[in-house]
Amino acid sequence: MTDTALDLSLYAKPCGDNTLGMDLAVDGVHCGGCIARIEHAVKELPGVTEARLNFTNRRLHVAWADDQIKPAEILETLERIGYHGYPFVPQRAEEEEAAEARRLTRYLAVAGFAAMNIMLLSVSIWAGSDMTPSTRDFFHWASALIALPAAAYAGQPFFVSAFKALRARSLNMDVPITVGVTLALAMSLVETARHAPDAYFDSAMMLLFFLLLGRTLDHAMRRKTRAVAGNLAALKADTARRFMGDELVSVPVAALRPDDRVLVRPGERVPADGVVVSGASEIDDSLITGETMRRQVGSNAKVYAGSLNYSGALTLRVTAVGQDSLIDEIERLLEKAASAKSRTRRLADRAARVYAPMVHLTAALTGIGWWLAGASLHDAVVTAIAVLIITCPCALSLAIPAVQVVASGALFRNNVILNAGDAIERLAEADTIVFDKTGTLTLPEPRVVNAAEIDPALLQMAARLALSSRHPLAMALAREADSAALFDGAVEEPGQGVRATVDGVEARLGSADFCGLPPVAALRSDTSLIMFSHGERSAAFAVSQQLRPDAVAVTKALSRRYDLRILSGDRNEAVAPVALALGIARWQGELTPAEKIAEIEALKAEGRRVLMVGDGLNDAPSLAAAHVSLSPIAAADLTQAQADAVFLGERLAPVAEALKVARRARALMTQNLTLAGVYNGIAVPVAIAGLVTPLLAAVAMSCSSMVVTLNSLRARGGGRA
Amino acid sequence: MNVLVYLIPMAVGLGLIGLLGFMWSLKSGQYNDMDGAALRVLSDDDLPPERREASEVP
């Protein structure tokens, strides 16, 4: 771990008398054995009163007596038994969603309880043809007594949302639901008071139960993906070495404040935007600008969070976010792009806009028609309300959420995590894909490209030697090592290389000068050479950005259906070979963030739906401007927050899978809407004719909901990686 | 059929007890870690050491 003391007091929160509590995201938990091992090890620390691992979201809650241990000791304990853990503060959004999920479950439980009890009473009424009217009345009153309070409680999410929509003078699916349920209950109450044979308490409660079921499932899926995303963010969290007087203390990046001084060693990422106070080094800005050429920095140079420090130690003064010209520019563009984004209307809302006025008009016309045809006012109103009950959009409101739940589950299994609720619909509409190059088409970390040309024994020796170095080029070489065993006595000479004695002969890895070899020039400007010598034998390793392993296959498959382009901030000579290798004819390099947006706006003006895939800070505004956007998990934080979905891993395949799942989901959504339409086409004429009985309403509504839900399950199939 | 007058409220009341039980279990966090509970039951940490030996499968 780190050799400086780690100060995590930022995360420890008081809970109870002299007790501190902390939540950690833990990586590498696989089985029941892990639970026991982790909880045991942590509980053995002095002062720890509670250690409980939640296996579902892989989080560990620890509580300990204040001043007995330091929080960093918990992390070290985990590290010692082979797990990586990092504390995190739950996002406000995640906590709110957890509360909302608990609320929805309570509504669901009440609606389910009421629906089941009322259904028992209703079945007795339907079956008991010899039931006396007074017994039937008693059953109806009992149903009313259960249904009214239950509906008032469990219907809240729909009533509140419908009220909000009406106040904003618009319509959503909750308006017809609220009208239908309220009228069904009111009419049933009036009919019960009149000793009439029919009441619709069962239909109203069943409707609420089905709708709440859809909403609860939708919520549960979103919570699950959000928890995983939260864990990934916590585990990615870096620490910074901050000067406290003359002493160095490791603190979480979140604890840094402007004007703090931090030390950045070679091979580390810059923790926060800042100005170099002392030291000189080479900086790799590729995560910020997409540029793969390294930049020389000295005193007073500006550096950005996420840049990689290559050669020398730097002392920085942290500046406030937004104080800087580049970040300012990006934030300004981001704001503009986000506000200009034409709010795509969701499929469900579009359907509601057509559906709600239509059913209300039909119901009104039915009532008026019957009255004009000579029916009594009471019969006309009852028939009109029966139309409203039967058309209550149960199937319609399940048609889209049900598919979304299943599809986001399928995406999750394919390593894609959704950020935005309606991303699936928008992904399905994309016809043009714009890729960023650095970190998106290429791997985020550089790789050795000529490993195959080098004697395997020599490669392994060099790679094992590289394990002893923190230099980014050496770390790229170290990835080739088969064994993780360091050479004894390996010494790193700062800014030069590493040397060790292997088989009695000195091996050196580093610059040509350090290895005593004649200087060699790299073939391409974006390739760095790292030299290795072992006695008489020597090798030159070329390290550069490399394409994701499946990039060629994936882009080739995608190009059959989509128009592919590359917009990069990197130099043209670095972009050209990538575009050539992938067979993407339309590419542009050396673009500023504003030019990227302009390109995307031009594509949008042509009527295209653009999917932007990017990772750099410079891509964040274009991600917001595009119709829909994806980011790899290694992306800059601000960028990831803008993306509609994030994909994990080294491969590009999740992008293609996400598009495939989204297209199938979109097809199923349309299919479901059609099914709901067919149901209405059959049920509405029956209702208009005045032939609907409570039994028929209950059967028709549950069958249509069931058909739609079962059809949605098809969004699962085939989507496995 | 007068018997229904108290049988039905009783039946609903029993259901209500079940509902309240569920609400209590929800509130006390019984559903926070559904996967973990299934694995914890296999761990024999809560047994005294001498019984732990005996329950181990060779």
Image: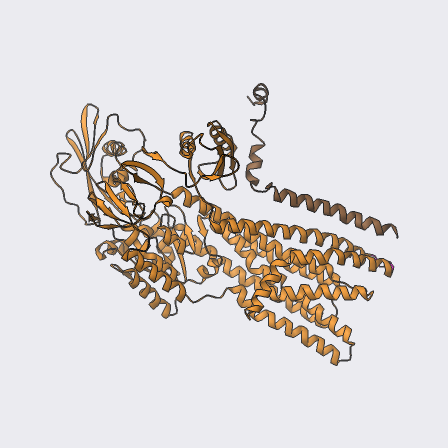
Q: Main secondary structure of the magenta part?
A: loop
Q: Is residue A566 visible?
A: no
Identify the residue at the far left of this view: A518
Quadrant where the N terminus of chain A sits is: top left
Does B21 sit above or below residue A18?
below
Q: Which residue occupies the foreground of this view, A688 or A294? A: A294
Residue A282, horizontal then vertical, whole percent: 21, 45
What colour scheme does the image use? by chain
A300 on left or right of B44:
left
Picture quadrant of residue A8: top left
Q: Is residue A363 magenta?
A: no
Q: Which residue occupies the foreground of this view, A40 or A373? A: A40
Q: Which residue is located at x 60 percent, y 72 percent?
A: A357
A452 on left or right of A707:
left
Picture quadrant of residue A145: bottom right
Residue A692, horizontal then vertical, whole percent: 74, 67
Q: Which residue is located at x 27 percent, y 46 percent?
A: A317
Q: Which chain is brown?
A: B
Picture quadrant of residue A475: top left
Does A536 sit above or below residue A411?
above
Residue A344, horizontal then vertical, whole percent: 46, 65
Q: Which residues are magenta?
A: A128-132
Q: Is residue A565 visible?
A: yes
- Rendered hue of chain A is orange
Q: Which residue is located at x 35 percent, y 48 percent?
A: A550
